[in-house]
Image (cartoon, rainbow, N blue to C red):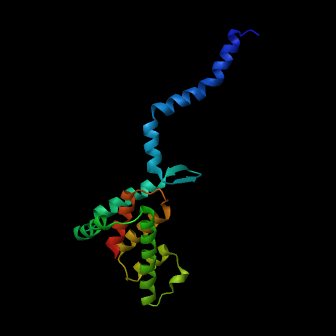
Amino acid sequence: MTVTFGDLVQLISVIIWPLTLLIIVFKFKSFFGGAINRMQSLDASASGISMTFQNKLDEAKALLSKMAPQLRDSAKSVTVSAQGFPYERVLKVKKELEEFLNQKARNHGIEASNHNPSNLSSQLSEIGLITFQQQKVINAALDLANSANPAITDEQAQVIEQLYATVK
């Protein structure tokens, strides 16, 4: 069997795209690795794919930076006392926030079992039991906790804990 020039061109045309893709991946592997580490979760919809967890985390950090200095200082003290695995700490914050909302509701005659935490925080804010700022912080912390996965980093868990510290 002889290999002709046409066979060689056909072989190259078949392998050129996979080879190009491999070269790009190896050339930019640190960029792709960093993007994958920042992702934590994906939101795939008709409008496309987005990196939701990091975006939510950035919004939470911005929310923390806009708070009054005394609230930021109390939130920073959380970083010193953080113990346990990050994901376990996030689940604990989520549970405590839900308990906080349920307790506030029960103390004022509101049936908490009929509401999800986000709706409950909105209702409590509407009747003045929590401030609008607290509602935003609670919803941001719960949203992050619901989006987190077991690979969450210590730094990411600390942001969620800092949000919680400004509420309690």
Residue 103: image quadrant is: bottom left
Q: Quadrant of the C terminus?
A: bottom left
Q: Nearer the viewer, residue 95 or 66?
A: 95
Q: Nearer the viewer, residue 11 or 55?
A: 11
Residue at x 70% of width, y 14% of height = 7
Taking the image as shown, residue 116 lies to the left or right of residue 129, namely right
Give the residue at the far right of this rendering: 1
Q: Reply above or below: 28 against 101.
A: above
Question: How far across and down, in percent of the image, does residue 148 sit?
Answer: 47, 60
Question: How far across and down, in percent of the image, does residue 25 sit?
Answer: 50, 33
Residue 75: image quadrant is: bottom left
Residue at x 50% of width, y 31% of height = 24
Q: Quadrant of the N terminus?
A: top right
Q: Reply above or below: 154 against 107.
A: above
Question: How far across and down, in percent of the image, does residue 137 sit?
Answer: 37, 69
Total numbered badges shown on the rendered structure: 0
Residue at x 67% of width, y 14% of height = 8
Q: Nearer the viewer, residue 122 or 8?
A: 8
Residue at x 50% of width, y 83% of height = 112
Q: Reply above or below: 136 against 22.
A: below
Question: How far across and down, in percent of the image, does residue 48 sit?
Answer: 55, 48
